Amino acid sequence: AKSKDPASWELAVALFRDMSRKAIQPDEFTFASILNVCANARHEDPTNVLDMAEEVVGEMRRLSHKIKPNHFHLSFCQRLQQGHPSDERPREWVTWMIHNGADPGKVKSKNPRGKQLRNNKKVK
């Protein structure tokens, strides 16, 4: 499922809750995938999205002796921060991730150079 597809939201929530229930520890990739789905879940209730992201980041914090946040985790939390400017939580997550080793210099911009617009026309 694509991360912008509503079905992937349901899937990600179910997967994460199931892992928690079975005490299976997610790895860095799983955390990144679920945060990506949260950052893309514009069709969902923002409260649900941020509550889910809070669960994910809370679990990352709990496992911080094993799993360090990286620039992927950071970029998804920055997108949550941009998408939900009135909520304080994403800013706290971004700060925590940077303090714990996520490199903001590695976060790629959403518009890579190949897609620059010149006079509102795509560069060939």
Image (spheres, rainbow, N blue to C red):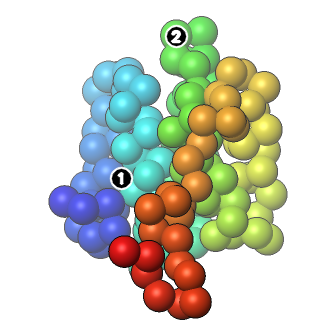
- From this view, report whether residue 57 is shown above or below residue 60: below
Res 117 label: none
Residue 79 occupies quadrant: bottom right
Nearest to the observer: residue 7 or residue 95: 95
| Labels 1 and 2: the sequence-earlier one | 1
Q: Are marks 1 and 2 in contact (CB under 8 Å)?
A: no
Question: What is the three-letter code of the residue carrying label 2?
Answer: Lys
Question: What is the three-letter code of the residue carrying label 1?
Answer: Val
Compared across the picture, whether 124 is left or right of 38 comes to left
Residue 116 image position (x, y, % from top left): 52, 71
Can see residue 45? no
Nearest to the observer: residue 75 or residue 66: 75
Most distant residue in the top direction: 65
Query: Few, some or many C-alpha atoms within 10 Å of disc 1 (few <14, some 14-19, many ≥20)?
Result: some
Real-space CA distance between mark 1 and mark 2, rounded to the nearest whole angstrom: 22 Å
Q: Which residue is mark 2?
A: 66
The N terminus, quarter of image: bottom left
Residue plotted at (68% across, 36% down): 105
Residue plotted at (27% across, 70% down): 5
The C terminus, quarter of image: bottom left
Badge 2 element: loop
Query: Few, some or many C-alpha atoms within 10 Å of disc 2 (few <14, some 14-19, many ≥20)?
Result: few
Can see residue 111? yes
Res 13 label: 1
Compared across the picture, whether 71 is left or right of 94 comes to left
Badge 1 element: helix
